Every structure is written in C-alpha cells, then in structure tokens.
Image (cartoon, rainbow, N blue to C red):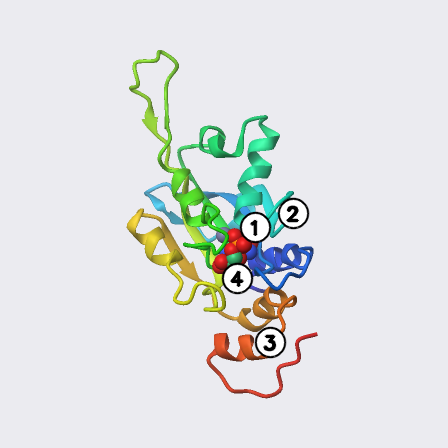
Amino acid sequence: HTDPHTFYLRKCLALAERSPPRPTNFRVGAILVSRKTDHHDPKKETGDITDDRILSSGYTMELAGNTHAEQCCLANLAAVHGIPDDRVAEILPYEVGRKLVMYVTMEPCGRRLSGNTPCVQRIVATRNSSSSNGDGDGDGFKRLGIEKVYFGVKEPGTFVGQSEGCKILTEAGIEWELVSGLEREILQVAVAGHENRDEEIRAALGTDVDDISVE
Ligand SMILES: Nc1nc(=O)c(N)c(NC[C@H](O)[C@H](O)[C@H](O)COP(=O)(O)O)[nH]1
Ligand SMILES: [Zn+2]
C-alpha cells in the first residue's frame, strides 16, 4: 500500500512517459487535485484521498509549442472552461473544506532558458485573482488557488543550475514538499532525450553508482 503522494507521483510519471524526448528540456507529468481538508484546520489534509477530485493533468509538450507539464495541466483546465490559459485562476474551484494541490514529477521551474513564463509564476498566479461577486465594486474574495505542490525530484542543474522554484513558491506562501522514493525513475524518464543522461542522473542522485541503466 503506497502513500497517496507516491500514488499520484506514479500517475504523473506515466504522463511524463508520453512526452517526446528532447535534449532541451525534461519530460515531466503534472496532476491538479482538489483535496478535502480537516474541518478544524483548512490547511491540513485529512490523508484520506477517497474524496479527492482530479481536476486536470498535463505532460511536457502535450500542447503545441515548447510547453511544460504544469503549464499544460493548467491550460487544459482553462480550455475545458473555454477561457485563455492566463485566466485559469478565474475558474479554479474555491470550496470550503477543500484545497487545491498540484503533483509534479519534478520541481516546478523558476526560470526557463527559452525565456517563457516559468511554471512557478503560473502556479503563483492562481492565487492572485480576486473573484468579483458580480456587482463590479471589486469587493470579491481572494481565491486561494493552488495551495501546495508535491514533487518527486528537485530540478537537476542541467539547464539553469541551482533551481529557484521552491524558493519562489515559499515566498508566494505556497507550500511544497519533496516526496522521496521515486527519484531514479523520475530522472530516467525526465532525461531520456539527453546525450549524457547517465552522468546527469548520477549527478542529480548525488551518488556514484555505476549500475544506472537508463532503459
Ligand atoms: N518542472 C518542469 N516541467 C517541465 O515540463 C519541464 N520541461 C521542465 N524543464 C525545466 C528546464 O529548466 C527547462 O526545460 C529549460 O530551462 C529549457 O527551457 P524551455 O523548456 O525551453 O522553456 N521543468
Ligand atoms: Zn516549467
């Protein structure tokens, strides 16, 4: 019986395996979940996932262009509601007794070599939209958006060196948690399109084991 976080990260890993291997990015999978919270503490998750609702999912390059898993996950949800992906915050559910969490195989990016909007910015943006109550006097309530991110590995230094994602999430008041146990599997999928993937995995695992078989 695996814990709920490993259960979801394995689902994200299966999504990541659908991503076309490229030397210029990582293959990542993401799932957005609405989770029941403890009725005494709106931050606390009950640990019981039977009431979870999977709102959306995405994987690297699922959508046209140079897209990231988290970006596709949010864009897919926006598309379901027929609005542009930069307005996805407006349609995210905001319910008493529930909170939104995102599972991603890899730490959301804080910087992208392409210069495209990093995923942490897209995640933080889900918290900034205030929903008007329709009377236009701007006294809407602040939607909480995505409150926590669970991921299975920190971003390797391959493209941007020391990753910034977690720091930016913390600064924005978004909790995050590194769920260990799947590092090797996540990295092997993530770097499948890279030339020196064995070396990359060794460096990322911080070990010098020689028995890393990429396949
Ligand atoms: N969390 C995450 N999800 C992804 O789907 C993905 N591809 C990355 N990858 C992070 C890496 O830092 C960037 O892929 C490079 O910085 C190149 O940037 P572009 O992807 O071309 O914008 N990270
Ligand atoms: Zn990203």
Relative to residue 167, is residue 126 drawn left or right?
right
Q: At label 3, which amino acid type do we have?
A: Asn
Q: Which residue is mark 4?
A: 3
Q: Is disc 4 in contact with disc 1, using a CB cutoff of under 8 Å?
A: no
Q: At label 2, which amino acid type do we have?
A: Glu
Across and down, in percent, residue 126 comes to: 42, 38
Q: At label 4, which amino acid type do we have?
A: Asp
Compared with residue 15, is residue 209 higher up or lower down, i.e. above or below?
Answer: below
Q: Which residue is mark 3?
A: 196
Label 4, secondary structure: give it.
Answer: loop
Q: Which residue is mark 1?
A: 69
Label 2, secondary structure: give it.
Answer: loop
Q: Is disc 3 in contact with disc 4, using a CB cutoff of under 8 Å?
A: no
Across and down, in percent, residue 139 comes to: 29, 19
Q: Is disc 4 in contact with disc 2, using a CB cutoff of under 8 Å?
A: no
Relative to residue 14, is residue 143 drawn left or right?
left
Q: Is disc 1 in contact with disc 3, using a CB cutoff of under 8 Å?
A: no
Relative to residue 137, is residue 23 drawn left or right?
right
Q: Judge: label 1 CB < 8 Å from ligand 1.
A: yes
Disc 4 versus disc 1: nearer the observer: 1
How many C-alpha atoms fall within 10 Å of the one at disc 4: few (<14), some, or many (≥20)? few
Spatial CA span between label 4 and label 1: 23 Å
Q: Residue at x 51, y 87 (%)?
A: 208
Q: At label 1, which amino acid type do we have?
A: Ala
How many C-alpha atoms fall within 10 Å of the one at disc 2: few (<14), some, or many (≥20)? many
Label 3, secondary structure: give it.
Answer: loop
Q: Residue at x 70, y 74 (%)?
A: 215
Residue 62's disc is 2
Q: Is disc 2 in contact with disc 3, using a CB cutoff of under 8 Å?
A: no
